[in-house]
Image (cartoon, helix red, strand yellow):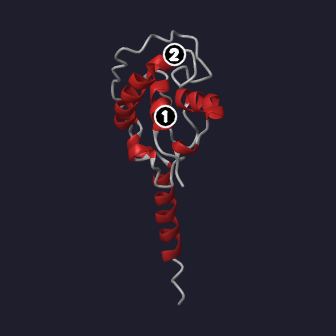
Amino acid sequence: MTMPISIRPLIAIVLAGAAGLAMAHGNVTPQPVNTGNLPSLGDEVRMENPFREGNELSEYYSEAVKVGESAYAGNCASCHGIRAMSGGLTPDLRELTEWDDEYFITRVRNGTDRGMPSWKKSLDQNAMWAIRTYVESLPKPE
């Protein structure tokens, strides 16, 4: 079946618009995060999750998981999926390993050119590392 030439540009515009929506996160309203009883990590950005079991602040692991679960639900789940189970348009955060800490904190702080906003003005690193701790506590995808 051949289409009239005038319909082809319309189809191209619709497809381009749909692709743009798939790649954009739209308006994201940061939700406040109560970091509870977590110790302040200060202003110097850490490149390793301090709350991970076996690290310097691992005694706060359980609290970090609780804080991270709430922070993730309010700020991350709309794009990265409930319990970090991505629908395929965004990375599945459960697949990150401990070696990806620097990647994680850099992406969360600075955002990406594919639509993820920068969170450094909205979340402190306590909240960011709590989110990472929560995601690490989830079962890995099979």
* Disc 2 crowd, CA 10 A, few/some/many (<14, 14-19, 20+): some
Q: Is residue 124 visible?
A: no
* Disc 1 crowd, CA 10 A, few/some/many (<14, 14-19, 20+): some
- Tag nearer the camera, 1 or 2: 2
Q: Position of residue 106 (x, y in %)?
A: 60, 28
* Nearest the eye: 92 or 79: 92
- Residue at far bottom of view: 1
Marks 1 and 2, how far apart at CA:
28 Å
Q: Amino acid at mark 2?
A: Leu
Identify the residue at horizontal 50%, vertical 53% (top origin). Answer: 89
Q: Position of residue 26 (x, y in %)?
A: 41, 43
Q: How many marks?
A: 2
Tell me which corner region of the image, top left, top right, bottom left or bottom right, holds residue 36.
top left
Q: Is residue 138 left or right of residue 48?
A: left
Which of the two discs, 1 and 2, labels the residue nearer the N terminus?
2
Tell me which corner region of the image, top left, top right, bottom left or bottom right, holds residue 56.
top right
What residue is shown with label 1? 117
Q: Amino acid at mark 1?
A: Pro
Q: Is residue 100 left or right of residue 66?
A: right
Residue at disc 2, secondary structure: loop
Q: Is residue 13 visible?
A: yes
Q: Is residue 128 above or below residue 140?
A: above
Q: Is residue 55 above or below residue 18?
A: above
What residue is shown with label 2? 57
